Image (cartoon, helix red, strand yellow):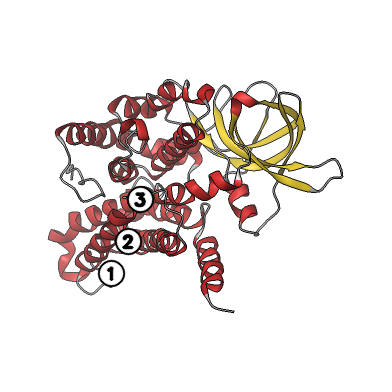
């Protein structure tokens, strides 16, 4: 099934938008689909395919310079994740790193943005620990001290994705005062040069092709030309909803792929599959409702209102949970053919579990929703 999904924003796409999505779909359903098992099982990091997707325009629609069309960006990510969840995750990493660079308003970083968007250079995001630290779930693992011209940063992060020597990622460190107490946080673009120690991660059950590494920094100098935000707190609050909304494309791609797999076997197995729960018509209706919700939210991706944030968190939970149900149902609908090591349905179950645990995980999202609702209650 090679149809192209309409942009999530629910609007009639322009000719240029349609052309971009068609080009992304052709790459995703061609070379990416052919490489999906190699990416999943052999840990192949598909930078060559990412470069082709960048040339097609997959990684710039959400940026202000390209019209800030988050719906179109999500549609492109969804097409990618529909064929390979690992590469869908890489697309999110790349998109959100570009978002950091542009929203920083740092001219040094803005000068690097075209190379990033057009796939001449690649970068990810190291905000798993900071997002949890800022929510009070775990301590901040990178620490910084102010020095002339910038900061010195030390510490370790256990896993950061879409990185390799010569690439870069957005990161956050807490700044220490002279007495050792925390002052504030800084956000910066970390260039992965020879001063940065990259450590191999334990093997995961999936997502091995995402080039995920541990990072260790020792008295690492960060210059002002690398700063995304100082202080980081207001910047993170402003981009938090956009950060989370851009992840929804991973979930919608897996749901669409699962619906494709169920419909594929309906002519031959429908007479027995009718007795399963989560049938295609049920999931399709819920999928449409999710897309409708997200369509409204992406119109104002930088809103920080508490009620809006609750809706964003809830939509992200809905996407993850729907991906879990849809991928499991697709495997049950396909039966043994979907359980083969080379089959998409069993791979997508593992990919959906990743969508459910990647920061912010379902439990993290519900934790934040509970905090916001407690704050909203009168004393």
Q: In whole angstroms, how far apart are the C-alphas of marks 1 and 2?
A: 7 Å
Image vertical order of residue 124 relative to residue 221, above or below: below
Left/right of residue 145 with respect to residue 260 in the rendered view: right
- Residue beneath label 1, please? 278
For mark 3, does the 10 Å Cα neighbourhood hold few (<14), some (14 to 19), or many (20 or more) residues? some
Label 3: state its secondary structure: loop
Q: What is the residue that sits farthest to the bottom in this orientation?
A: 379
Residue 326 is marked as 2
Q: Position of residue 19 (x, y in %)?
A: 18, 32
Pointer 1: residues within 10 angstroms few (<14), some, or many (20+)?
some
Q: Position of residue 224 (x, y in %)?
A: 64, 26
Compared to residue 311, the image places residue 21 above or below, namely: above
Residue 204 seen in this snapshot? no
Going from N to C along the chain, the mark reached first, 3 or 1, is 1
Q: Position of residue 289 (x, y in %)?
A: 26, 63
Seen at 32% across and 33% down, the residue is 58
Q: Identify the residue position indicated by label 3 in the image.
A: 300
**In the image, what residue occupies the spot 56% across and 47% down?**
234
Callout 1–callout 2 Cβ contact below 8 Å: yes
Q: Secondary structure at mark 1?
A: loop
Q: Earlier in the sequence, mark 1 or mark 2?
A: 1
Quadrant of the rendering where the N terminus is positioned? top left
Q: Is residue 117 visible?
A: yes
**Alpha carbon separation for disc pair 2 and 3:** 28 Å
The residue sitting at the right extreme is 179
Mark nearer the N terminus (2 vs 3): 3
Say if 331 sits above or below 113 in the image: below
Within the image, what quadrant is residue 147 found in?
Answer: top right
Residue at the (38%, 42%) spot, across then down: 88
Q: Nearer the viewer, residue 123 or 337?
A: 123
């Amino acid at each position: 099934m090679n149809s192209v999904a309409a942009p999530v924003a629910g609007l009639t796409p322009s000719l240029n938008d349609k052309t971009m999505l068609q080009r992304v779909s052709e790459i995703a359903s061609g070379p990416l689909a052919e490489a999906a098992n190699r990416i999943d099982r052999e840990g192949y990091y598909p930078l060559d395919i990412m470069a082709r997707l960048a040339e097609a325009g997959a990684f710039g629609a959400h940026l202000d310079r390209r019209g800030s069309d988050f719906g179109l960006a999500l549609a492109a990510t969804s097409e990618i994740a529909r064929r390979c969840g690992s590469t869908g995750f890489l697309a999110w990493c790349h998109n959100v790193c570009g978002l950091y660079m542009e929203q920083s308003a740092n001219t040094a970083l803005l000068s690097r943005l075209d190379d990033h968007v057009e796939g001449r250079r690649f970068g990810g995001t190291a905000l798993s620990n900071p997002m949890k630290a800022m929510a009070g779930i775990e301590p901040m693992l990178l620490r910084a001290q102010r020095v002339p011209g910038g900061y010195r940063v030390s510490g370790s992060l256990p896993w950061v994705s879409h990185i390799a020597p010569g690439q870069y990622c957005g990161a956050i460190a807490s700044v220490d005062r002279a007495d050792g107490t925390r002052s504030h946080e800084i956000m910066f673009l970390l260039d992965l040069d020879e001063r940065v120690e990259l450590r191999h991660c334990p093997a995961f059950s999936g997502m091995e092709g995402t080039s995920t590494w541990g990072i260790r920094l020792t008295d690492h100098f960060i210059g002002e030309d690398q700063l995304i935000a100082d202080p980081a707190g207001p910047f993170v609050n402003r981009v938090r909803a956009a950060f989370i909304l851009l992840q929804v494309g991973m979930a919608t791609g897996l749901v669409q792929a699962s619906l494709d797999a169920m419909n594929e076997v309906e002519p031959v197995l429908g007479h027995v599959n009718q007795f399963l729960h989560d049938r295609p018509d049920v999931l399709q209706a819920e999928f449409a409702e999710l897309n409708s919700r997200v369509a409204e939210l992406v119109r104002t991706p930088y809103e920080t209102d508490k009620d809006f944030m609750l809706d964003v968190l809830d939509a992200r939970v809905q996407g993850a949970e729907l991906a879990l149900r849809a991928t499991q149902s697709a495997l049950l609908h396909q039966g043994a053919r979907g359980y083969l090591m080379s089959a998409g349905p069993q791979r997508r179950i593992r990919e959906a579990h990743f969508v459910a645990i990647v920061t912010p995980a379902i439990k993290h999202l519900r934790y934040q929703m509970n905090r916001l609702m407690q704050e909203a209650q009168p004393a």
